[in-house]
Image (spheres, rainbow, N blue to C red):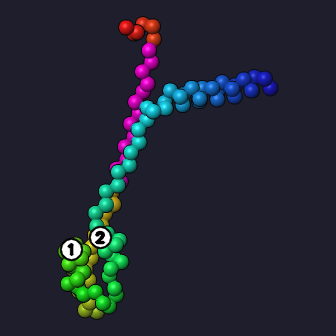
């Protein structure tokens, strides 16, 4: 029973020491790049009210434009969202008596 508790204490101390040494040494960043139509511009579109000319004026030239089998003109806008993640770990400098100047 005492051996079990001793192993737990050693484990927790090791984890705590490792956490202290690693603190401030890890950098994570996420950059999100979005290209496309903004939500506020989409909210301005009213079904049956907004003309094709108004759409192109507000949203820009569509990625695709075609006529479907019913004869309706379709404007397609392509939007992309790209996330770049970066993880950098800088090991701590450990000073010993040998390399101390």
Reading the image, the residue beneath label 1 is 60
Q: Nearer the viewer, residue 42 or 88?
A: 42
Most foreground residue, 96 or 8: 96
Side of 100 relative to 41 (left or right): right
In the image, is residue 85 part of the stretch drawn in magenta?
Answer: yes
- Placement of 56 over or under 82, stated as above or below: below
Q: Secondary structure at mark 2?
A: loop
Q: Residue at x 59, y 29 (%)?
A: 16
Q: Looking at the picture, does residue 79 appear above or below residue 46?
A: above
- Which residues lie in the magenta part? 83-95
Residue 52 point in image, percent of width and height: 23, 85
Q: Residue at x 44, y 15 (%)?
A: 95
Where on the picture, by quarter, is residue 92?
Answer: top left
- Look at the image and say whether residue 28 sits in the magenta stretch: no
The residue beneath circle 2 is: 37
Q: Residue visible at 33% across and 76% down? A: 42
């Amino acid at each position: 029973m005492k051996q079990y508790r001793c192993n737990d204490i050693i484990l927790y101390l090791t984890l705590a020491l490792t956490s202290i040494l690693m603190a401030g040494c890890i950098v994570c960043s996420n950059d999100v790049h979005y290209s496309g139509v903004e939500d506020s511009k989409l909210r301005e579109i009213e079904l049956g009210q907004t003309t094709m000319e108004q759409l192109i004026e507000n949203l820009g030239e569509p990625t695709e434009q075609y006529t479907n089998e019913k004869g309706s003109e379709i404007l397609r806008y392509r939007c992309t969202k790209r996330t770049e993640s970066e993880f950098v770990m800088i090991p701590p400098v450990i000073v010993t008596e040998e390399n101390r100047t």
